[in-house]
Amino acid sequence: MILYQYLAEALFFAFILLTFIGGLLAVRSGILMHAVLGLAVSLLGVAGLYFYLGSPFLAMMQILIYIGAVCIMIVFGIMVGYTPAQLQAGQVGGKNLVLALSAAVTAFLLLLVALSRTVWVPAMVKSGDYSLAYLGESLLYQYCLAFELISVVLLTAIVGAIVLARGGREEHF
């Protein structure tokens, strides 16, 4: 095996590890801001997997929308809705921790089995045209459904951030 194939496999498993560690941090953290940071790290790992699999457009959209918009929106909701004392008091443990860890381990094992049984086909050769006109045409025609689904996720994140912001302050006033 050639050196770059080893490096590519190492990079692939590094992205998987980054995704898993970020997810574990998001689930395991008792502090809400650390959980959001774990979510951002996990989403960054997923973006790396998109890039590795030959889709730089999806990787950039993952970074821009999920990390850049959704995570920032959640952080904004936390900052508006909770006092620093409330953020430090959050605790995770007991039944929720066991359920979260078992769900994460199960999902990881299922993904590992799926990855090991998948026959990987090399990505199609891209045109190499990354002009603004090409990107706009791709968004409107080729990736229209993905673009619309992303907007639904962004709307859900906005509503979730508003709910987070309202719920935290109303408990103490």
Image (cartoon, rainbow, N blue to C red):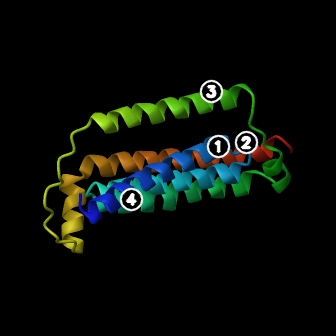
Note whether 9 is above or below 30 in the view shown.
Answer: below
Residue 156 placed where, x, y %? 50, 44
Mark 1 or mark 3: name the one nearer the start of the chain: 3
54 shown above or below 160 = below
Question: Is residue 21 toward the left or the right of residue 108 in the image?
Answer: right
In the picture, measured across the screen, residue 15 lies left or right of residue 71, that is left
Is the residue marked by circle 3 packed among few (<14), some (14-19), or many (20+) residues within 10 Å? few
Give the label, 4 or 2, closer to the camera.
Answer: 4
SS for tag 4? helix
* Residue occupying the point 64% across, 49% down: 35
Q: CA distance from mark 4 to mark 2?
A: 41 Å
Residue type highlighted by circle 1 = Val
Which residue in the structure is indicated by mark 1? 163
Question: CA–CA distance between discs 1 and 3?
Answer: 24 Å
Q: Residue at x 40, y 50 (%)?
A: 151
In terms of secondary structure, where does tag 3 sit?
helix
The percent coordinates of residue 77 (x first, y second) are 66, 53
Q: Amino acid at mark 2?
A: Gly
**What residue sits right under mark 3 in the picture?**
99
Disc 2 packing (10 Å; few <14; some 14–19; many ≥20): some
Q: Cα distance, mark 2 to mark 3?
A: 25 Å
The residue that appears at 17% across and 70% down in the rendered structure is: 128
Q: In this rendering, would 51 be left or right of 125?
A: right
Work out how far the residue at label 1 is from the one at label 4, CA to CA, in angstroms: 38 Å
Upstream in sequence: badge 4 or badge 2: 4
Residue that badge 4 annotates: 11
Q: Which mark is residue 167?
A: 2
Instruction: Give the image location of residue 104, x and y in percent.
Output: 54, 34
